[in-house]
Image (tube, helix red, strand yellow):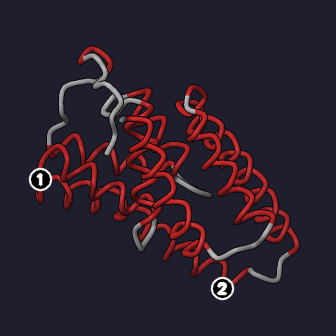
Amino acid sequence: MDTRPTPPLAETAPPPSVGALFFGFLKLGLMGFGGVLPFARRMMVEDRRWLTPAEFTDLLGLCQFLPGGNIINMSVAIGLKFRGVAGAFAALIGLIAMPTLIVIGLGALYDRYQDDAVVHHLFAGLAAGAAGLLIATAVKIAAPLRTNPAGIAIALAGFLFVAVLRLPLLVTLGTLAPLSILMAWRRAS
C-alpha cells in the first residue's frame, strides 16, 4: 500500500466526465504511433492533470504486472477510477477505435507495398523514433523515485534482471514485486 501523503488537490484537475475520458483516450490513440505510453503520461499528468506523477508511476506499475497491454489496462483503470464501468468502457473504446481502423488500412497498404525499399527505410526510422520516445518516458517515469532509495534499487534490479540477465518478465515481477512491497512496508513502519 502506498504510504506517501496524498498530494494537494491543486495538483490534479477535477475528475473527468465519461465524454472527457472517451475523447482524451481517442486523441491518445490517434497520437500513439510507435507506442502510446509517452503520450499517455503527458496527457494524464501534464496536460489534463488527472493524475500526479507518482500516481501515474504507481498505476503503470500495477498495469504492467497485469496480463495484457499496459495502456489498455491503464485506460480501463483510469476509467474505473473516475467514472466506474461506463468510464472504463469509454476510455477503452476511445483508445482502440481509431487505431484499429488505421491499422487495418495500413495493413492492406503494407501487404501491397512491403517489398519497396522506401517502405523498409520508413519502418526503420519509425522504430528509431519509437525507441527515443520510450527512453524519454522512462526518464520521466523514474523521476518520482529519485527521493526513494528502495525504489531506485528495485528499478535497477529490474533493469539488471531483464536487460542484462535476460530473465523472463514473470520471474522478474514475481521476485521484485514481493521485495518491493516488503521494502515499502518496512519504510512505512
Image quadrant in which you'd find residue 163: bottom right
The residue that mark 2 highlights is 111
In the picture provided, is 103 more to the left or to the right than 158?
left
The residue that mark 1 highlights is 84
**At 78% across and 69% down in the image, what residue appears?**
165
The spot of residue 171 in percent (x, y) is 58, 75
Q: Amino acid at mark 2?
A: Asp
Q: Which mark is residue 166?
A: none
**At 48% across and 35% down in the image, what residue appears?**
42
In the picture provided, is 13 more to the left or to the right than 38?
left
The spot of residue 75 in percent (x, y) is 32, 55
**Distance CA(mark 2)–CA(mark 1):** 40 Å
Note whether 166 is above or below 132 in the view shown.
Answer: below
Image quadrant in which you'd find residue 46: top left
Note whether 158 is above or below 148 in the view shown.
Answer: below
The spot of residue 68 in percent (x, y) is 42, 72
Q: Secondary structure at mark 1?
A: helix
The spot of residue 59 in percent (x, y) is 38, 48
Q: Amino acid at mark 1?
A: Gly
In the picture provided, is 10 more to the left or to the right than 170?
left
Query: Total label count?
Result: 2
Lower position in the chain sequence, tag 2 or tag 1:
1
